[in-house]
Image: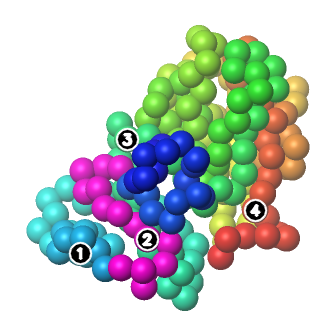
């Protein structure tokens, strides 16, 4: 993730950032700061491009009242970087120990490839390339869920295999291959970005 000003201070230190996909636009934290730079960007922010032959799914975003304008496309082959973090996965054992990955609204596929919402490419070949598991944040009910992603190897929460969708509780330990992750919850009953 990069900033428009060319430094590595991170997303929250710069009020604008580019969002990926075929229709890059600059999204402002405060829409009153300036107008979009082009008619195409303006059409994209207002809900889609006129004449768009390949529409992409738009992610659920908080911000009732016009505080946030979002146009982050979700398409296959494009890495997703959440704008509003709802929680984290922290590698506590195995390759990548000490690293963390943010979770965003909706479905977060976890796997080795860059196209996953949560990329765990630290050298553990037992983690599936695509969607070893899926972690979802349900913004309506303020709950997290985990489910098997279809990979060959199993996912475990504690010592129990994840064979169907189940609720993911605060500080749960998740095992994928030789990697153990600690789930850190930010959003829930006490706090949400909405």
Q: Tag 3 or tag 2, which sits nearer the N-term?
A: 2
Is 38 left or right of 12, judged from the image as shown? left
Residue 64 picture location, percent across and down: 56, 84
Q: CA distance from mark 2 to mark 3?
A: 21 Å
Cα distance in 3D space between marks 3 and 4: 25 Å
Cα separation, mark 2 vs mark 1, equals 15 Å
Element carrying mark 3: loop
The nearer-to-camera label among 4 and 1 is: 1
Q: Is residue 166 magenta?
A: no
Which disc, if any, is residue 187? Answer: 4
- Crowdedness of circle 1 by 10 Å Cα count: few (<14), some, many (20+)? few
Q: Quadrant of residue 131?
A: top right
Residue 28 is marked as 2
Q: Does residue 12 appear in the picture of this structure? A: yes
Q: What is the CA distance from the residue labelled 4 to the residue labelled 2?
A: 23 Å
Q: Main secondary structure of the magenta part?
A: loop
Q: Which residues are magenta?
A: 20-34
**Label 3 to label 1, Cα distance in Å?**
21 Å
Which residue is disc 3 drawn over?
Answer: 78
Q: CA distance from mark 4 to mark 1?
A: 31 Å
User: Marks 3 and 1: CB-CB under 8 Å?
Assistant: no
Magenta residue check for 26: yes
The front one of 76 and 114 is: 114
Q: Which residue is mark 1?
A: 43
User: In which quadrant of the rendered view does residue 35 lie?
Assistant: bottom left
Foreground of the two, 119 or 151: 119
x, y (%) of residue 29? Answer: 50, 72
User: Which comes before the other along the chain, label 4 or label 1?
Assistant: 1
Q: Nearer the viewer, mark 2 or mark 1?
A: 2
Q: Earlier in the sequence, mark 3 or mark 1?
A: 1
């Amino acid at each position: 993730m990069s900033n428009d000003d060319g430094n590595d201070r991170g997303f929250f230190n710069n009020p604008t950032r580019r969002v990926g996909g075929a229709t890059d636009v600059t999204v402002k934290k405060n829409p009153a700061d300036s107008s979009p730079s082009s008619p195409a960007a303006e059409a994209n922010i207002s809900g889609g491009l006129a004449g768009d032959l390949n529409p992409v799914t738009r992610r659920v975003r908080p911000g009732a009242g016009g505080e946030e304008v979002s146009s982050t496309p979700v398409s296959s082959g494009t890495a997703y970087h959440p704008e509003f973090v709802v929680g984290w996965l922290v590698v506590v054992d195995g390759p990548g120990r000490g690293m963390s990955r943010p979770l965003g609204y909706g479905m977060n596929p976890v796997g080795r490839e860059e196209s996953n919402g949560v990329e765990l490419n630290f050298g553990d070949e037992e983690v599936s390339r695509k969607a070893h598991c899926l972690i979802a944040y349900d913004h309506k009910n303020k709950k997290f869920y985990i489910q098997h992603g279809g990979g060959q190897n199993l996912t475990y929460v504690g010592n129990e295999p994840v064979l169907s969708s189940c609720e993911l509780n605060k500080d749960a330990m998740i095992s994928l291959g030789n990697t153990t992750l600690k789930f850190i919850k930010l959003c829930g009953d006490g706090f949400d970005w909405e």
